Structure formats: C-alpha cells, structure tokens
Image (cartoon, rainbow, N blue to C red):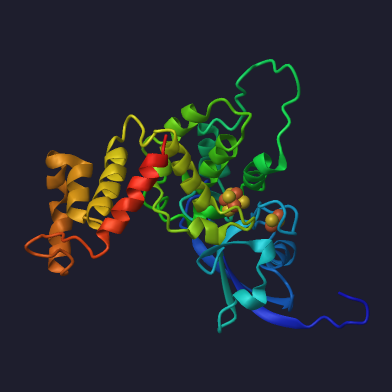
Amino acid sequence: MEAGRETVLMQATLKVYRHDPDAGGKPTFQPYPLELPEDATVLDGLVKIREELDGTLAFRASCNRGFCGECTLRINRGGRLACMTRVASARTKEGEVTVEPIRNVRVLKDLVYDVDQLLWQKIKAVEPWLQPTVSQPEREHVLSDEQLRPVRNAMKCYYCGLCDEGCSVIPFDNTFLGPAALTKAYRFVSDPRDGARAHRLRAIGEPRGMWDCVHCFEADEHCPRGIGPTHRIMDLRDAAVGMGIKSGTRNPQVARHYDSFAASVKASGWLDEGRLALETWGVRRIFDLLPVAWRALRRGKLPTPYRHPKRPGAERISRIFEKVERRSP
Ligand code: SF4
Ligand code: FES
C-alpha cells in the first residue's frame, strides 16, 4: 500500500482446479471466496488461498513480475500469466474467476503440470545448440546489430508456453512441435554462425513440424514477449523454400501443395481448390477426401459442374510470378 493511500478491498471468488492424480478421484473446481485489494492479481489470490485457507494448493510461480513465465495458467478459459492478470478485470459479473492448468498437459497436482512434456521434449527435438561451421574458429565471430536482431528477438523467449496453449493445432495433435519449439529452431536458423541450417530446416520440415502450422496467429496473440512465433514459423518456411527445401522426406505432399498453389494462382489469378487437392494428394489418396467434398457440396461450397475460370487481371498476376521466378536462384 502506498503511504497515505487506503487499500480498497473487493470481493471475488476464485474457482480453482483441484486434482491430485496420485490420490485418485476426479478433478473439481473448488470455490474460494476472497477479500482482496482492488489491484490484486490472480497470483495474489492463489497465494492468499495457500497461506490463509488451504495450504495444500499447488501452483507454480517465481518472479511475480511477468519476467519468468512460470505462472502460465488458463484463467477464464484463456491462457494468461497469473501474476499479470488482475482479478478485477478478469472476474465475471458474478465476481468469479476460473483458474485451471493449461490445456493438453499432464497435470501433476492442482495447477502444476508437466512442463517437460509440454515444452522441453519438443525444444530438445530441434537441437537447441549452436552447430558452428568450424569447430575451432581462428578468431572471434563478430556479428553486426542487423545480423543479431532476429536472434535477439527469438532469445527473448522465456518458455512460458502461452503460444503452445493458444495453438490451434496442438489440441488435435499434441505431437506437433508447436510455436515455442519452432521459435527456438528459428533462433538457430537465423544465426549466421550456425552451420546446420539446411539440416535444421529439413528436420523441422518433416510431419508435425513447421508445415503443420495453420497460421491462425493465436501464438502471436498470446506471446507476452512480442516475439511473434507464428511469423517466425513463416520465416522458417521462407528460409526453407529459399534453400529449395519445400518438404521433408516423409511429407512430399507439402512440396506438391506448395507448387500446385502457386501454379494455379499463376495460371488463373486465383486458387483452384480442386486442382490443389488432386495435385497435393494424388489420385489414390483423393478418394479419402470424398467425404469432405460431399460436405462442401451440401453446403453449396463446391460449384457443380466444377469449373475454374480465369479471373480478370490474371495475366498481370502471371507476370508477377514470372518476375519473381527470374529473380529466384
Ligand atoms: S514464444 Fe512467447 S509465448 Fe511462446 S514460449 Fe516463448 S515467450 Fe512464451
Ligand atoms: S511469476 Fe514470473 S511471470 Fe508470473
């Protein structure tokens, strides 16, 4: 409390996820009615519960300043840092705030979850160490500010996991590397001292890597460090395509998708989705897509008979492609 200023108190109920998998039983949301200062954060509320109401409540936090990324939780169904979320702005009309672990993680106890499974295993998979071109450099490798800018940006990551929590792919496939690990990969791909660029891009180009991102930009929305993980994934893709690495060895359809997309826009001025599906998946796999085509047909999203006329101005678009192709190595 500031000197001479009286603390204004407010009422709020924190509905906190409680579960101890070792003890068995089902998860519950335990309501804790609290009286808190009006500027209290959700983390302040959790500390008060543990100190005054229930010493068995488990949660993780460290700096209490938004610096460490330890207190990532789902608050009112959205990923947030508990120490940076004010109860007053989060509570509903009924004065409630729901607090639970983030999605798609193994809960160890209450609000503490398995960060190894969420982050570290995926980060280890992208070989998060510098692999220099020569093992014994003769002198210091000095980089300019310009060269270091992308590296520094990626190094701001403090592994809070909020981007993975917001990711649209992970809820469907938890083996997807995810934006946090791909941001780590970007940190090394963008480092001019690293000699494993092509190897890295090939590795993260395999299934469940960078091509599985659906660029929903949720990761950018969630990142408290302003790193722009989705943009970094797109940078990785650009770097891969720039080096002629359009897909991994186990997902050649990515390169076919890429080429077909460009070819149809170049030819007609817009995307030919029928051609895209056929050229990406081939005649044999296309039959697997028939249920999708049927649903699209019923919703009026598939023109019958199927046709794909040239758009006005298609020639201009085609010339842009030719110009870019002439510039490409
Ligand atoms: S990229 Fe941003 S949101 Fe993702 S783990 Fe790093 S700091 Fe957190
Ligand atoms: S406790 Fe460090 S960011 Fe919240």
Q: What residue is shown at x 71% (from left), y 34% (from top)?
A: 143
Q: Where is residue 272 in the image (x, y as percent from the top left)?
A: 21, 55
Quarter of the figure that contains the N terminus: bottom right
Q: What residue is shown at x 55% (from left), y 44% (from top)?
A: 183
Q: Position of residue 144 (x, y in %)?
A: 71, 38
Residue 221 lies, with reference to residue 324, above or below; the image says: below
261 lies left or right of 297: right
Camera-nearest residue between 22 and 61: 61
Residue 106, visible in the rendered structure? no
Camera-nearest residue between 78 and 311: 311
Q: Which quadrant holds residue 210?
A: top left
74 lies left or right of 143: left
41 lies left or right of 111: right
Camera-nearest residue between 75 and 13: 75
Quarter of the figure that contains the C terminus: top left
Q: Position of residue 2 (x, y in %)?
A: 89, 75
Camera-nearest residue between 134 and 251: 134
Q: Which residue lies furthest to the right in this view?
A: 3
Q: What residue is shown at x 56% (from left), y 83% (from top)?
A: 94
Q: Which quadrant holds residue 138?
A: top right
Q: Which quadrant holds residue 248?
A: top left
Q: How many marks?
A: 0
Q: What residue is shown at x 75% (from left), y 59% (from top)?
A: 65
37 lies left or right of 257: right
Q: Where is residue 163 in the image (x, y as percent from the top left)?
A: 53, 53
Task: For ligand 2, give the image quadrant.
Answer: bottom right
Residue 35, visible in the rendered structure? yes
Residue 125 lies, with reference to residue 79, above or below; the image says: above
